[in-house]
Amino acid sequence: MLRSLKSWTAFVLLILCFIQIYLLEVSVGASETKEDKCKKFSNKSCDECVKQDGCAFCEKDKHCIPFDVVKDVTHKSCEGQDWKYKQCVVSGKILLIALPVTGFVVLLALGCTIYCCCCRKKKRFRGLDKEEAKWRRQREEIEIKHKERREERQKKHDEIRKKYGLYKNDNSEEPEDGRYHRFDNTAVA
């Protein structure tokens, strides 16, 4: 058991050593090759330079330089910010202005869309509910007024019918055909 533990420990240490050696070679080799690789394309065309990974073309000096966006932009490694990175159409100073403005416009449009689609729709539905309730109240008030007027008209009609003897009473002995009958004005003696 002790023997297998020692062998596993030795194996793990050996793997860790290989990893450290590999990382050291990659980091040293990459920095040298990246800088050397970019310098090879100096005084050549922009297209040849920007095709290389991590290289930018400085338009003013016609040099191909290794490019780290944050470091080189803030330290102004290319005079006048006239560098081209991964394309040869638009210079760096235009990209520094256009990309943030475009990002802001996209975020603003997204915010407006979300507000219009979500927030205003809820307000509109709340407003419709209030309007519906208001319309219902108004309709009920109108119906109550119509009912009162109908009752008043019915009373007036009943009075006119009584006046001309057309009114039917449940207790009356008048003919029930609803027609006008001659009223006899005989004195009761």
Image (tube, grey):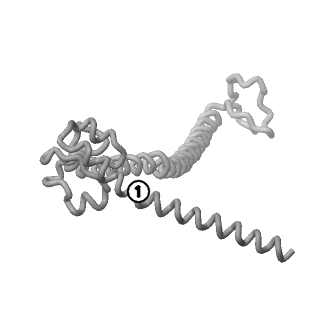
Give the position of the N terminus as an image quadrant: bottom right
Residue 75: % across, % down: 22, 63
Give the quadrant of residue 77: bottom left
Classify mark 1: helix, strand or loop. helix
For image coordinates 36% across by 57% down, the residue present is 31
Q: Nearer the viewer, residue 135 or 56?
A: 56
Give the position of the C terminus as an image quadrant: top right
For image coordinates 73% across by 34% down, the residue present is 168
Q: Nearer the viewer, residue 117 or 21?
A: 21
Is residue 57 at all visible to an observer of this figure? yes
Residue 11: % across, % down: 70, 66
Residue 31 located left or right of residue 141:
left
For residue 169, above or below residue 119: above
Q: Nearer the viewer, residue 135 or 130?
A: 130
Is residue 152 at all visible to an observer of this figure? no
Residue 123: % across, % down: 48, 52
For residue 77, above or below residue 48: below
Residue 4 located left or right of residue 69:
right
Name the amino acid, label 1.
Gly
For image coordinates 67% across by 30% down, the residue present is 166
What residue is disc 1 on? 29
